[in-house]
Amino acid sequence: MPAHVLVLDAAEGIGPWARDALAHAGLACALVKENVEALRSVDAQWPALVVVPLDEVERWAPVLGRLSDGPTTVPVLGMASRDASVDVTPALALGVTDLLTYPCNGEDLVDRVTSSMRGRRSGRGPASEPASPLAQLRAVTEAAEEALLRTETAVARVSRAEEREHLRQA
């Protein structure tokens, strides 16, 4: 199965738009509205990336927790409205690795998703063999460096001073 993007959106806010933009760009994509359905999707095929609205991130905590317990790091793109005042600290604590504000055009979303998927390590997944301790340590270190880079990139994009401070603290 090809790598795919899992879009989590219970309120059907940005979900249909994100699914359509990603599908139009030729990316395999699934829109999920319920935790049970999302967990089944994750178990059936490990996603290459997850997109979640920041205002729903706590609702999706079981799914994000399952992803963090998995055999490979899955980038999680949090989408936040430019008009909303959102505390990103809980999202970062639950595993959101990158942020994108909307409204934006579909090309911005596709660029961000493909960039994040490129950084994902190949050869790791639910069926892969356990690696040596040194290889596991290297993978963890690289994942931490990627997360730090994404956080620093998100800090540069955030326009509100209060949100910047939350990102720095996280």
Image: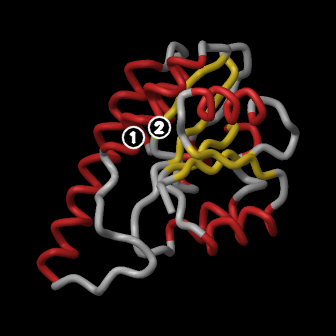
> Which disc is residue 16 wearing?
none
Q: Secondary structure at mark 2?
A: strand
Of residue 118 and residue 51, the one placed in the foreground of this image is: 118
Residue kind at label 2, given as amino acid type:
Asp
Residue kind at label 1, given as amino acid type:
Ser
State the residue position of label 2. 98
Q: Residue at x 78, y 33 (%)?
A: 16
State the residue position of label 1. 116
**Residue 85 x/y as whole percent:** 70, 23
Q: Residue at x 55, y 16 (%)?
A: 160
Give the tally of numbered discs: 2
Q: Residues within 10 Å of mark 1 (few under 14, many from 20)?
A: many
Residue 38 vertical position relative to residue 9 in the rendered view, above or below: below
Mark 2 → mark 1, Cα distance in angstroms: 8 Å
Of residue 3 and residue 111, the one placed in the foreground of this image is: 3
Q: Residue at x 69, y 49 (%)?
A: 30
**Residue 166 x/y as whole percent:** 51, 35
* Dot 2 and dot 1 residues touching (CB under 8 Å): yes
Q: Residue at x 39, y 45 (%)?
A: 117
